[in-house]
Image (spheres, coloured by chain):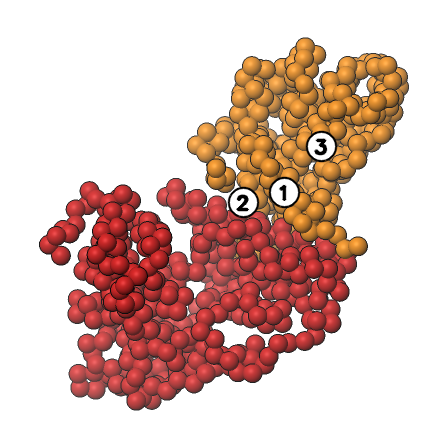
Amino acid sequence: MSPNLLYSTEEQDLRASVRDLLTDRCPPERVLERCEEGETGDPALWHTLATQLGATSLHVPDELGGQGASVREVAVVAEELGRFVAPVPFLGSAVLATSALLGCRAGQQRDAVLADVAAGNRTATLVVPLSSCVGGSFPTAVRAGEGRLSGSVRTVADGASADCLIVPARGADGPELYVVDAAEGRVAVDAVTSFDITRPVSDVEFDDVAGVRIADPDLAATVLDDAVRTGAGVLASEQVGVAEWCLDSTVEYLKQRYQFGRALASYQALKHRLADLWYELVVARAAARYAADQLATASDDAPVAVGVAQSLCARVARHAAEECVQLHGGIGMTWEHPAHLYLKRAKADEIALGSPSAHHGVLGPLVDLHPAP
Amino acid sequence: MSESVTDTAELDAEGLRSRTREFLASNDPATTDRGEFLRARFDAGLAWVHYPEGLGGLGAPRALQSVVDAELEAAGAPDNEPSRIGIGLGMAAPTILAFGTDEQKQRFLRPLWTGDEVWCQLFSEPGAGSDLASVGTRAEREGDGWRVTGQKVWTSSAHNARWAILLTRTDPDAPKHKGMSYFVCDMTDPGVEVRPLRQITGEAEFNEVFLNEAWIPDSNRLGEVGEGWRVAQTTLMNERVAIGGRPMPREGGMSGVVADTWRKRPEGADAATYDRLMALWVEAEALRLAGKRLGQQLAAGSPGPEGSAMKLGFARLSQELSGLELELLGQEGLRYDDWSLRRPETVNFTGRTAGYRYLRAKGNSIEGGTSEVLRNIIAERVLGLPAEARADKDVPWKDLPR
């Protein structure tokens, strides 16, 4: 079947609900205020997204307490959250951790955690460095022995807000995945200062902590790789949202800003830069939609689609944010204008879940383009 | 015609399929002369089904043409070699259909479609490229016709053409957009001289056309006197439709050519060029998907403005990719196949050698609307930014600086 690269009516409705909520509760000024007050997240907004809009359970099957939708809908929510640089742990919990849980075999422990996370009763994250790229070797930072974990992982997304941690660990027989309760005394989650102010990162340390194994060596590496791939594919849609806000706000600003007796938007040098950004956004959106669709249908082409989308959308969002700052001139360089929130998000997203060149290296061999010897 | 009175109920895919089969039954492509077959196809309304009855069509939805084409192709029927007569099919015909008199439609459309008469387009001039509305080729009244003098440029097929669509200046005292008229020009007129225009590849795909008191009867005017710009808009709109929107497989264009070069492990392949190659491959794939998305929007009845992004991206990628390919080739990239003046029948952007592809790609951001003009269009029509300041709108054409 031909992939659907458009937004379905249901997806448009979902987008409208999320956008209404964020317009009301999460305008850029409010996000900035929170940052100034030193709050790294908006738990009340997160609660509303989870419980009223079901945004945390979209691609979870009905029988596990989810909405039975797909990654396509998850991507639509990510796009809106990107547009508002909303400080909620969607990527860590609803995308990375949830996808990992979905990949594990059904069982009492896994199903219970998944249902809780889907319902928004608990928040989770996947304990890997946010810079992890699909196709990497299974991490060895945490060791598992007889159900107890030790080791530390740096720069984990959405760690501080997580109640439960999905931890890749190396056991005696190979890679495994565990669920660990973050409230355990021997777990230390240290929030570090994040470059991306609206997406907190933490260093996580396990000192002989009890964990529940949810994936055995036969499955763990695949589960982790699939979760990181899904995360990268969804992140591409977030990047489309980031880029779109940057373009829209720059267009609006240049229309109302006058210098030398003319609207800045009337200068061809600036118009052409905006036209180029618009072009980039057109191709980025097509790539992101394709990735979401291929992930949703578990297509064989999903790995290629994600490589294309993530390497392209990362560059496009970063470029759009850089242009946003530059074309806003002096005001774009100030703390009081929200452009820097988008620049920080976009630059961090370029590194998150694999940089463009890391994705090129993974993608190439999939399409018979191998690196130079 | 009485036996096949058109009934709208049968203008669906099934109706057209059976109509095509009936036509094939009485016109066996294996035993019918090619020209005769094409003329019969036109008369049966199967040439372009969305055209009116009697003019090669049936007034059917345009999308159903593919049903007819598939039946004919399966039967081994000859086609009208659309790549050879693209200007006629894509630009002249819709303009004649929209603005022509009944006599003009009857006279021109049938041999245009069958390819018995090739058409070319006399629009651009050395002094009127992006600013087409400033054309200076003069047409002056003389008796029941017009004398035309001027120079046109970048005319493909002019050396094979029987007819041309021609944009002229008929009233130099009017503001530029108001003083133009549009004609069908006889390319065999003694006042028409065609010279090859050699381009940077060495070959001459195009021509310069010199009009030296060429004679055009007034019966060959399309649209009213002074209405030429509006008629030309129809032509140009159809040019954009003709350029955009065919589905392409992955690696279907220049990216596939360069990817294949990479796979042969050329001399210049290294880690840095690999990353460049992958970035361009990714963008080409994303542009392909954007084209597909555009097609889906059209099919859903909500065409977006994304079409103008396609040409911008196509030009950029062709140029970047073909440039990278030359570097990959190393020593081989220092050689060129042939600089001699050739006159190709059709053009293939991904044909010949890497050197040719690199040079030909330079035209992609100039022909059919420069990338700079496209960016203006995107900025003004899509993003709603203010239009460029104009100093030429209400001034008589003859008083404009040039």
Check if mark 3 and mark 1 are on a common chain.
Answer: yes
Q: Which residue is found at the position 64% from the left and 22% from the top?
A: A102
Vertical relation: B18 (above or below) B334: above
Q: Residue furthest top?
A: A108
Query: Dot 1: what SS?
Result: helix
Chain label for disc 2:
A
Give the residue number, with chain letter if any, for mark 3: A225
Quadrant of the image containing the C terminus of chain B? bottom left
Query: Dot 2: what SS?
Result: helix
Disc nearer the start of the sequence (3/2): 3
* Residue A344 visible: no
User: Residue A306 or A162: which is nearer the viewer?
Assistant: A306
Q: CA distance from mark 3 to mark 1?
A: 14 Å
Q: Colour of chain B?
A: red
A20 lies left or right of A149: left
Q: Residues within 10 Å of mark 3 (few under 14, many from 20)?
A: many
Disc nearer the start of the sequence (1/2): 2
Give the residue number, with chain letter if any, for mark 2: A286
Q: Amino acid at mark 2?
A: Ala
Q: Which residue is found at the position 54% from the left and 55% from the top?
A: B252
Give the residue number, with chain letter if any, for mark 1: A304
Chain identifier, colour orange = A
Q: Amino acid at mark 1?
A: Val
Q: CA distance from mark 3 to mark 2?
A: 24 Å
Q: Nearer the viewer, mark 3 or mark 2?
A: 3
A166 lies left or right of B311: right
Tags 3 and 1 touching, CB below 8 Å: no
